[in-house]
Image (cartoon, rainbow, N blue to C red):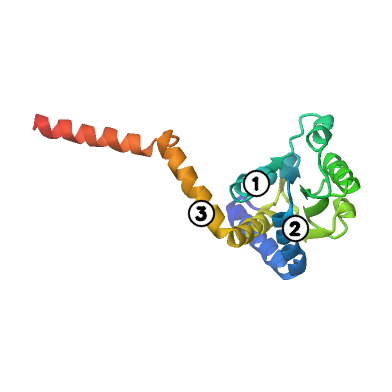
Amino acid sequence: MKKARILDDIMKSDMAKIEETLKSIDRDAFNNAVETILKAKKIYIIGIRSCAPLAEFLHFYMNLICDNVILVTTNTPSEVFEQMIHINEKDVVIGISFPRYSMSTLKALEFASNQKAKVITLTNSVHSPINLYSSCNLIAKSEMVSVVDSLVAPLSVINALVSALYMKKNDEVLQRLEMLDKVWDDYQVYGSDELNQIEESVVIKENEEI
């Protein structure tokens, strides 16, 4: 791959993976995933190594939409099971794994399945080992380009999943976001208002000196 064309080549490759995913993804599985998540008492999300950013992104937005969303972290192998020890048939776990497949994710999904929890997977192939424990498989194209795993298509599927959940719980989510906006304002979480006040005071002083 020539340096001069790397931007074009990589982005065109990512676009192609999104198009392939759009053509091949199982719509019934996608809709089933949405309904399963909406009915779940608790939602566990696990993604390790290069899949960790995908899991974190999904957790961030799902936490605004649904209650009891748990991001399973994995500093040690035992932590996975410690965090999932109470999982049961009323819960769902979303496992995200792409080659090279994570054994920790695989074992976590096996445990969840043995506890009768619903299992949803986001992976690259119907032959992915994590699909052994899933009744709902979301397949997104991914392959290594140079030294980087392309995870653009999986992220696009996650965006679609979050958007579908938002549409189902529109009024509730809007109410939650309005509440968050008020909390952010009350506790000055973001400093934009503060910066505007500083800028205005500077302008007033300059005018007074003139």
Q: Which residue is mark 3?
A: 174
Q: CA distance from mark 2 to mark 1?
A: 14 Å
First-in-chain label (2 vs 1): 2
Res 74 → quadrant: top right
Question: What residue is pinned by disc 1?
Answer: 67
Q: Residue at x 70, y 40 (%)?
A: 71
Instruction: Using the rendered view, name the quadrant where residue 161 is placed.
Output: bottom right
In the image, 152 versus 69, the foreground residue is 69
Label total for image: 3
> How would you rate the neighbour count of disc 1 (Cα within 10 Å): few for under 14, some for 14-19, many for 20 or more?
few
Q: For marks 1 and 3, give the CA distance.
A: 14 Å
Circle 3/circle 2 CB separation < 8 Å: no
Give whichever of discs 3 and 2 has the lower sequence position.
2
Residue toward you, 156 or 172: 172
Query: Residue flagged by tag 3: what amino acid is it?
Result: Leu
**Looking at the image, which residue sits at the far bottom?**
23
Q: Secondary structure at mark 1?
A: loop
Q: Residue at x 77, y 60 (%)?
A: 139
> In front: 88, or 18?
88
Q: Say which residue label 2 marks.
A: 36
Label 3 CA crowd tier, 10 Å (few <14, some 14–19, many 20+): some
